[in-house]
Amino acid sequence: MDEYDIVVIGGGSGSQVATAAAEAGLEAAVIERGPLGGACITRGCIPSKALIHRADVVEEIRRAEQFGVAAELTDVDYGEITSSIRETVYEKAEGQESSLEDADNVSLYDGEARFVDERTLEVDPGDGDDGGERLRGETVVLAAGSRPMVPPIDGLEDVDFLTSDDALFLDDRPDELVVIGGGYIGVELGYFFGAIGADVTLVGRSETLVPKEDDAVSEVVTDSLESYCELYTGYEAAAVERDGDRVVVTAAPSDDTDNTDDETIDLEADQLLVATGRRPNTDTLNLEATNVETDDNDHVEVDATLETTADGIWAMGDIVGDQPFKHAADYEAQIVSANALDDAGREVDYDAMPHAIFTSPQVASVGRTEHELEDAGREHESATIPFDAAPLGMILEAGDGLVKVLAAPDGEILGCHIVGPQASTLIQEVVVAMDGGAGTVDDVAEPVHVHPALSEVVYAAFDELSSQPYSTAPDWRDVSSE
């Protein structure tokens, strides 16, 4: 049996812990059953955003006439789009695998890991052979990630359907598609397929899409997606069946809304996409052989240092589930490396952890939503500024976009929510202010902002709540309304 100072289960962000250990002169091992890089590189963030970029290009061509440019969209080579993206992301994964294999003091095991006892792991290569190679780690890091969740919908097991993993690399575009799920995965893929010409029907349990976002953001996204999809918000899929070459989804009013309509509706399409979230891969690890405990949603329980309920076993990424984002997993890799290798006692701080949704328009958020603050009874002030208050927002005709700022009476930033072009980039100055400065609205409102840039709308929103006696924040709404 091979023995290591540290064993990492998962080849995504967790591999950064292994390489950090190796650079410190320790012997490390990584166990990964699929392409290196985790879900992000080959099954999530990167290929989905590459697809969405193509949809954005298509939309720019369609909108060109609004800006006096004569342009015509004659064809979308769907197969070329997906094949080129597949080639790019898998080339990246292969590059990461080669880099890890060439690293000193790191060994890569290809297969699925299962605990035999608290320090011993068996690697199942998935070739059908009984048993597998065993290895032992003085320290173990759980970074096994997640996979698409398949909800218990009547008849679903008897019908061919796509998950978010499957939908990324189809050879042919569906002509008609029903999407079950109104969260970030559903709206991103619903926008993509709708923008490139598919007839998309989207079913979401809540009254608005992306219901975990601030209400102002959810309303904008819901209104926008109506341009790309036929929406059935406030409904949930109750049953699915195959009718010849087509799939029929029976949707019923959801308990999550005030919908009092008892009528069910039947939605037909060529294909079905189930995009109802992701579940942690804890069930693959045989955690029963350890003292590692999980919560009611099967996420691994950890303390503030990301150590599990078993001494010397740490966890990070989607398997923990607090912040299911790649950038959060990278941050957690830093925490685990410091604590597992240096006994640093660092604690995670998610107060300024941002996230983004790459639909149209883009969404980015950090901190609390207004609904969360109201539920907590937290006194706060709010300011909402539309994108067309900034000159560039007006030029881009992004009037449906907005920046919403939530702050305490003393000026502490409690949350910021942006929906509109470049939202994922615009949020960053707010993150820096919350994480690296005093964390007040003045930290954003006082610095000079480039003119004309979209960052001016962020400036204008924070200036609204600022204590500064004089203001130069732009407000072009009177011009854009003419």
Image: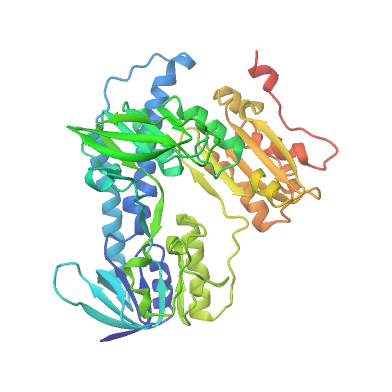
State the image coordinates of residue 455 (x, y, percent, origin top left): 62, 37
Decide if residue 195 is on the left or right side of residue 390: left
Residue 450 seen in the figure: no
Q: Nearer the viewer, residue 105 or 380?
A: 380
Up/down of 115 relative to 93, above or below = below
State the image coordinates of residue 224 (x, y, percent, origin top left): 49, 28
State the image coordinates of residue 337 (x, y, percent, origin top left): 48, 73
Task: Write the residue at 65% across / 16% down.
Answer: 481
Quadrant of the image occupied by residue 179:
top left
Task: Write the residue at 26% across / 28% down.
Answer: 175
Q: Nearer the viewer, residue 183 or 298?
A: 298
Decide if residue 111 is on the left or right side of residue 346: left
Up/down of 120 relative to 215, above or below = below
Task: Write the residue at 31% across / 48% down.
Answer: 165
Task: Write the residue at 46% across / 81% down.
Answer: 312
Q: Nearer the viewer, residue 410 or 162?
A: 162
Residue 211 seen in the figure: yes
* The C terminus sits in image quarter: top right
Quadrant of the image occupied by residue 241:
top left
The tally of labels here is 0
State the image coordinates of residue 40 (x, y, percent, origin top left): 38, 53
Decide if residue 346 is on the left or right side of residue 157: right
